[in-house]
Image (cartoon, helix red, strand yellow):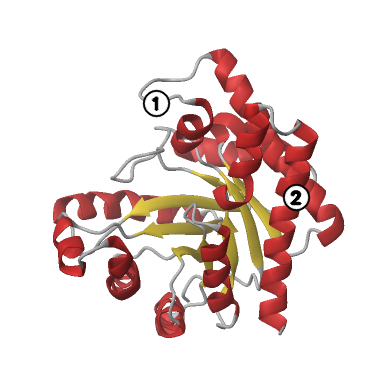
């Protein structure tokens, strides 16, 4: 029996960012945050969560969810669990080119919070460093087997960064993203599946062409699998994310999105600069998330 997920809609507000969150909002890079900074970062994470909660007061909980980290949002995770929200938490070390676990005792951390989904972010290009790919797959297989044995749901975020040769061949990043990356994503998924790594849901970069979106779903569900696909935002502009969601909403098997910085970053920056109050930032985050949810559902049902 192939692993899969029976979720028919999953619309995630993602704010599990750690390194990028610290650097872009607080200017912290190359060092650990102080205790005071951790408290301030956690306060800003709570604002994103409050925006999500505010949005669900109009949207309802069904089909919605959040993705947050333990480092700065452990209180949010506990509150989400208490209030019955669908939530995911990452296990990867932030900002690493090669996947490794954030904690040596990562199983204990999963058991402590018991998230709806355990999420991993992996940078995996099947034509890149063979040794690094093998090391990643060994760790991922260990995670995969633990989650399946424990009957916990597995959310796999796959990024396929270009190699220097691929980028040179494409000429520029935009051409790589449109013409080369989608096929590499399918190949990466197939390689991971061949090594026994079976996510319940794939969290994938957006693609511009409908045939590429269909190819991703086809690979996610190859050989009788039932895995779903959600489209990630990659910090792109609202316009670009809307384009990707419109493509995905029409494809059976793409069940939603996981968008973060596009929803919350401008609001939090405005709050940090004093241009917006905390309540205003929370309201803007709620509006932005709600707009994406309504767009998705309109395109899906239209």
Q: In the rendering, at what x and y percent does residue 241 appear?
A: 54, 64
Q: In the rendering, at what x and y percent does residue 225 appear?
A: 47, 78
Determine which of the numbered discs, if any, sits on residue 29 in the image.
1
Q: Is residue 115 left or right of residue 283?
A: left
Q: Given contact means CB atoms under 8 Å apart, are the residues at marks 2 and 1 in contact?
A: no
* Residue at which label 2 appears: 286
Residue 110 against residue 212 in the figure, above or below: above
| Image quadrant where one finds the C terminus | bottom right
Q: Is residue 230 visible?
A: yes
Residue 30 against residue 173 in the figure, above or below: above
**Going from the N terminus, do you reach mark 2 or mark 1 first?**
1
**Residue visible at 56% across and 38% down in the picture:** 69
Q: Is residue 239 left or right of residue 173?
A: right
Secondary structure at badge 1 equals loop
Residue 30 against residue 161 in the figure, above or below: above
Residue 51 against residue 33 in the figure, above or below: below
């Amino acid at each position: 029996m192939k692993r899969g997920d029976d979720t028919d809609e999953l619309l995630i507000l993602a704010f599990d960012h750690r390194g990028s969150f610290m650097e872009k909002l607080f200017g912290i890079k190359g060092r650990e945050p102080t205790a005071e900074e951790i408290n301030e970062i956690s306060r800003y994470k709570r604002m994103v969560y409050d925006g999500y909660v505010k949005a669900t007061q109009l949207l309802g909980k069904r089909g919605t969810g959040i993705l947050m980290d333990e480092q700065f949002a452990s209180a949010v995770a506990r509150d989400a669990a208490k209030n019955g929200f669908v939530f995911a938490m990452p296990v990867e070390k932030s900002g690493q080119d090669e996947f490794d676990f954030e904690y040596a005792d990562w199983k204990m951390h999963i058991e402590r919070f018991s998230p709806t989904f355990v999420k991993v972010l992996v940078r995996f290009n099947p034509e890149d460093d063979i040794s690094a790919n093998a090391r990643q797959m060994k760790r991922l297989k260990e995670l995969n087997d633990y989650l399946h044995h424990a009957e916990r749901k597995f959310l796999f975020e796959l990024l396929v960064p270009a190699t220097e040769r691929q980028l040179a061949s494409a000429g520029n990043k935009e051409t790589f993203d449109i013409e080369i990356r989608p096929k590499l994503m399918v190949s990466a998924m197939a390689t991971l599946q061949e090594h026994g790594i079976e996510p319940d849901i794939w969290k994938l970069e957006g693609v511009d062409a409908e045939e590429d979106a269909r190819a991703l779903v086809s690979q996610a569900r190859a050989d009788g699998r039932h895995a779903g696909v959600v489209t990630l935002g990659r910090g792109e502009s609202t316009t670009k994310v809307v384009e990707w969601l419109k493509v995905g909403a029409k494809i059976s098997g793409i069940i939603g999105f996981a968008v973060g910085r596009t929803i919350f970053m401008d609001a939090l920056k405005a709050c940090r600069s004093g241009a917006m109050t905390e309540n205003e930032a929370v309201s803007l985050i709620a509006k932005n998330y709600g707009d994406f949810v309504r767009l998705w559902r309109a395109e899906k049902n239209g």
